[in-house]
Image (cartoon, helix red, strand yellow):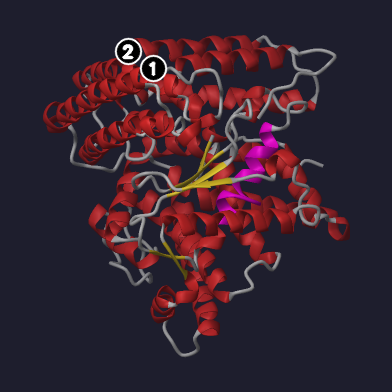
Amino acid sequence: MCRGAVGRRRSLWRVTALEQLADRYVTEFAALDPCRAAMMGISGQESHLTDYGPGGWAARRELTRRTLAALDGTPLDGPAERVGAAVLRERLEVERALDEAGVPDAFLDTTDGPVQRLRMAFELLDRGPGTPWEAVLARLRALPAMLDGLRTSLTRARRDGRVAARRQVARSAADCRVMTGYLTGLAARHGEFSKDAALGGALRDAAAAAAGALTGFAVFLEEELAPHAPERDALGRDRYLLGVRDFLGTRLDLEDTYAWGWAELARLKAEIAEVAARIRPGATVAEVRAALDADPAHRVRGAEAFRAFLQELADAAIDALDGVHFDIPAPLRRIECRIPAGDAGIYYLSPAEDGSRPGTVWWSVTEPDEDVVTWSVPSTMYHEGVPGHHLQLGTATLATGRLTRFQRLGCELYPGHGEGWALYAERLMDELGFYRDPAHKLGMLVGGQLFRAARVVLDIGLHLELPIPAGTGFHEGERWTPRLGREFLRAHATLTDAGVAFEIDRYLGRPGQAIAYKVGEKVWLEAREAVRRRDGEAFDLKAFHRRGLEVGPMGLDLLRAELTRP
């Protein structure tokens, strides 16, 4: 999962009107939405939090309107600016459509809602001895007011009949309670790195006030909002299509995509059985997976040893690929692997705009002192690191002479592009011969491909409440429910029961996001095949990848057009 964007350099000769507009938009956007700006790697707002009150939403709405109007009158200088303008317009029009549909100010989610973004704003400052404690203090002091504003927005939306589903409200309340412990612990860690007693006391006091505000907000969610929240999770076709437009930048025939997801599942199951038979002939896939889980060769003891394992994988991939399959710029030859507090999942954050934060892979570990199973880890590391998110997003953020500032920092806004490339990168490493241990290929197929294909089926099926087709061997003819979704996911993913429950809640809160991986990968593969057919023996895979990385983040319809353009 990608989140986020490196130094900024203007042409020595001139700055075009589009560059000025894009730069101005990013600057104003960051000031109005510091939490999202932090995730995107935009510097300068480290002491601030996003205003989720009605005034904050109105200001962001006005910025979108004003920038779209300015874009209409902006002259464009050549093909690169044509693309840059199209990318910016696409995003702004999606933001306007979401606002017109009444989505943003009522939005609660399990992975990327306001509560989760507020926590991320602190996690990004949490750098051990390098933590900017004054910025942490400023954000702690701002948190109660931000929660008051969010409460006001959610209350107004409720009065208009717009309330997130009950499971999203409940998850957000639970995350508030977890966040209280994290913030008090963060403030307490100041004493490990500094002798400034006054600052330490201020941090502890502010953290206590923030924790109290979070507890109060959790009570508001549980006692005032949840009773009005619908039990039904499915958001329906219109809202789902808006989600597809938001996360993928394309338009889909949902029934065709649903059927394709089932076909992908069948194809992948056959491939998984073949690889499993190579590892342990005569055993079932489940038996092979259990044997790999128990094999000491595929286990690492403790969070720190696992972090070192991840770092070694990241460094080795860069060394092996650079100059052979990709030309990796010097600033991207560093990835920092970190283990976050709590169960934050696995995700990548690209370098900060000013270079103050390197590209970082975050990987949660459930029990810090227990064994971690590693046979499925290499493919995920290729997904998050190189040649996945780190190479893709880093290439874009370094492209100061070619892409607008908005394009360079826009990964967070284009999951279809970013997650599609990262899943493609997992498969590419198989094509390039990097899964020499068949267990690692099995990990790629089970942990990446099968899981993401199951998401296509589940996400569309759950939100449209579609029937399960005949011939699938799974509750044929029944319509999707969260209960069936949990059963289905347990059969198609290497997740704990808690992980399965989290995934289902995630899909139901963010319609369209879960299909970004496989549908995005499909666009990358289809574009590659189209260029291969067109170029024949002259086809150059390295050149195709260079072109694909250089175009920057964008929606999938724009991406397909640019990748196949002669």
Residue 393 sits inside the magenta stretch: yes
Q: Amino acid at mark 1?
A: Ala
Residue at 24% over, 20% down? 151
Q: Characterize the magenta stretch by its predominant secondary structure.
A: helix
Name the mark on residue 479: none
Front tag of 2 and 1? 1
Which of marks 1 and 2 precedes in the sequence?
2
Write the residue at 81% across / 12% down.
Answer: 14
Query: Is residue 63 a member of the stretch shown in magenta?
Result: no
Q: Residue at x 61, y 45 (%)?
A: 335
Q: Residue at x 50, y 59 (%)?
A: 448
Which residue matches tag 2?
A: 54
Which segment did they paint magenta?
380-397
Quarter in which the C terminus is drawn: top right
Give coordinates of residue 205: x percent, y percent.
26, 21
Instruction: Determine which residue is flagged by label 1.
Output: 138
Q: Is residue 534 above or below residue 12?
A: below
Most foreground residue, 48 or 140: 140
> Crowding at label 1, few (<14), some or many (≥20) Cα neighbours within 10 Å?
some
Q: Nearer the viewer, residue 137 or 457?
A: 137
Image coords of residue 406 (percent x, y): 62, 24
Q: In what element is the residue under mark 2?
A: helix
Q: Is residue 481 above or below residue 65?
A: below
Residue positioned most to the front: 195
| Dot 2 amino acid type | Pro
